[in-house]
């Protein structure tokens, strides 16, 4: 993946996680963007990796709201099945992340 495309994806993801009030369709796009970033993680610079880690932390802070939005359009299981998500893409497991967040609270 080219440097410009990677930067665009990272910017899109970084901005997206700041808006947990988005629709379920936008959550699907956010999850897909994160999966595209995962494929280019070996090529990330240190600064890009730090930005991704901060964005992931913000995603986790807002996971319950993203989950609720996703439920308005599909189930997480169905979304993962359609996207053929590998188990290593933890961000697609919103129901488990939201449950873990409730247990930790």
Image (spheres, rainbow, N blue to C red):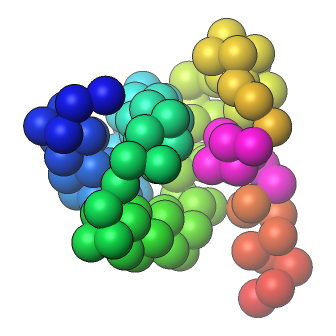
Give the mark count.
0
Dominant secondary structure of the magenta stretch? helix
Depicted 67 relative to depicted 63: above or below:
above
Which quadrant of the structure image shows residue 2? top left
Query: Percent from the top left, x then y, of residue 26?
Result: 37, 33
- Pick out the residue farthest to the left: 4
Give the camera-side residue of 4 and 76: 4
Query: Percent from the top left, x then y, of residue 58?
Result: 44, 72
Start-end of magenta stretch: 88-96
**With 12 as the anchor, is 28 left or right in this view?**
right
Query: Where the N terminus falls, by quadrant?
Result: top left
> Is 94 inside the magenta-drawn segment?
yes
Which quadrant of the structure image shows residue 63? bottom right
Give the camera-side residue of 16 and 70: 16
- Pick out the residue farthest to the top: 82
Which quadrant of the structure image shows residue 85? top right
> Is 77 inside the magenta-drawn segment?
no
Q: Residue at x 81, y 85 (%)?
A: 104
Query: Percent from the top left, x then y, of residue 27?
Result: 45, 38
Query: Where the C terminus falls, by quadrant?
Result: bottom right
Q: Is residue 45 visible?
A: yes
């Amino acid at each position: 993946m080219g440097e410009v495309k990677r930067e665009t994806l990272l910017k899109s993801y970084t901005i997206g996680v700041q808006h947990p009030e988005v629709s379920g369709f936008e959550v699907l796009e956010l999850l897909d963007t994160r999966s595209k970033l995962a494929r280019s993680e070996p090529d990330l610079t240190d600064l890009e990796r730090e930005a991704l880690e901060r964005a992931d932390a913000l995603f986790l802070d807002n996971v319950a709201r993203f989950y609720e939005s996703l439920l308005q359009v599909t189930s997480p299981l169905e979304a993962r099945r359609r996207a053929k998500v590998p188990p290593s893409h933890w961000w697609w497991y919103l129901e488990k992340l939201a449950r873990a967040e409730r247990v930790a609270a």
